[in-house]
Amino acid sequence: MDDTTTQTNGSGDYEVLDEVRAEHVEITQGGAALVQAETVTITQGGAQMIEAREVSISQSGALGIDSDHAVLEGSAAFVVNADTADVNASIAGFVVSDVVKAKGSTIGVLFAGTIEGEPNVKVDARTAAAMGAAAAITYVILKRLFSRS
């Protein structure tokens, strides 16, 4: 990776790049299929896959984000895998994170250690896993109790 900033800025025409690899990437009104960098900032654009230490997307979208720290502001993402995820006024399909900080957001499926704020979570995977385990244990116990010997 080089130390330059790769920037797409489509004034009128949207520029879409296949792959962007650089130290710092800033995309404004454009998009990329794959972005690999230390820091990524996207404003009114999008990316299919982002792999970076720090990701910030505003009024944008991403199919997948793999990051140490991801910030979504008024954006949408399908899958977010981050140590810390700040999801503000945004929508995310799946979030896997140690810490989720959310405000005014909707998350479809959440796998998180700590949740700060009050996101609208459709399925909290921690609760779903506990319910699944309880159902499996109940099934085994009932099967043993009522088995035909």
Image (cartoon, helix red, strand yellow):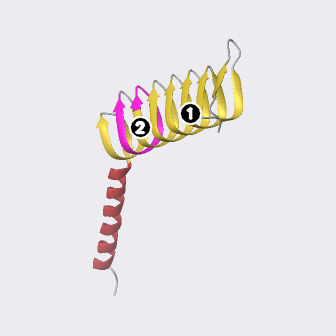
Q: Which mark is residue 85?
A: 2
Amino acid, disc 1: Ala
Q: Residues within 10 Å of mark 2 (few under 14, many from 20)?
A: many
Q: Residue at x 45, y 31 (%)?
A: 71
What's the magenta bit mostly, secondary-structure-wise? strand
Eyeballing the image, is 92 above or below 127? above
Residue named by callout 1: 62
Q: Is residue 111 magenta?
A: no
Q: Is residue 11 left or right of residue 82?
A: right
x 30%, y 33%: residue: 118
Q: Vertical placement of 137 versus 112: above or below?
A: below
Image coordinates of residue 140 in percent, x first then y, are 34, 73
Q: Residue furthest top?
A: 12
Q: Mark 1 or mark 2: which is in front?
A: 2
Whichever of callouts 1 and 2 sits on the residue coming sooner in the sequence is 1
Please report the residue visible at 71 percent of the width from the left and 15 percent of the height from the top.
13
Residue closest to the far bottom: 149
Q: Quadrant of the N terminus?
A: top right
Which mark is on residue 125? none
